[in-house]
Amino acid sequence: MNDLAWVPQSCTLPTEERPLRVAEWDALLSERLTSASRPEPLRLRLDLAAGPGVEERVMELVERESGCCSFFTFTTAAGPNLISVDIAVDPAHETVLDALAARTAAAWRAR
């Protein structure tokens, strides 16, 4: 999924920076994803393996993503072995969450 056409116009991240941000998410998912689920149509849950510096990495990425894509609502919970990230969107941005879920599935298959 190298095509970024699914990124909505409401995203304020400069176009030239979008592939870099997507690559950051892809790297995090390919390195740390332990499970993903879609408990509701407008919510994606990611469970990531914890480790040195991982919580800070996740929090910094979530903060930057929230800054440019205000339609995302992130909720994180960190434990000793796992960092959970819930990503929610409004109905108008369900296709964006669908694309993120597809990228997550691709990262899982690539492991």
Image (tube, helix red, strand yellow):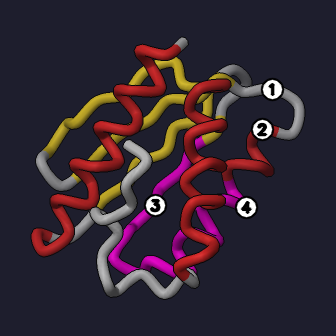
Which residue position holds label 1?
Answer: 51
| Quadrant in which the N terminus appears | top left
Choose the circle earlier in sequence order: 3 or 4: 4
Which residue position holds label 3?
Answer: 74
Whether pointer 3 and pointer 2 mark residues with C-beta atoms closer than 8 Å, the reply is no
Q: What's the distance in space between the residues labelled 1 and 2, CA to CA?
A: 5 Å
Q: Which residues are magenta?
A: 59-77
At label 3, counting other C-alpha atoms closer than 10 Å, the crowd grade (few under 14, some 14-19, many 20 or more) is: some
Between 31 and 2, the residue placed more toward the observer is 2
Residue 9 at what x, y percent from top left?
A: 32, 84
Between 34 and 15, the residue placed more toward the observer is 15
Q: Given the image, on which type of amino acid does mark 4 rest?
A: Glu
**Residue 54: assigned label:** 2
Q: What's the distance in space between the residues labelled 2 and 4, CA to CA?
A: 10 Å
Image position of 93 with respect to 25: above or below: below
- Is 31 displayed left or right of 43 in the figure? right
Which residue position holds label 4?
Answer: 60
Residue 63 at what x, y percent from top left?
A: 63, 69
| Quarter assignment of residue 65 | bottom right
Q: What's the distance in space between the residues labelled 1 and 3, CA to CA?
A: 20 Å
Image position of 84 with respect to 108: above or below: below
- Is 85 displayed left or right of 48 in the figure? left
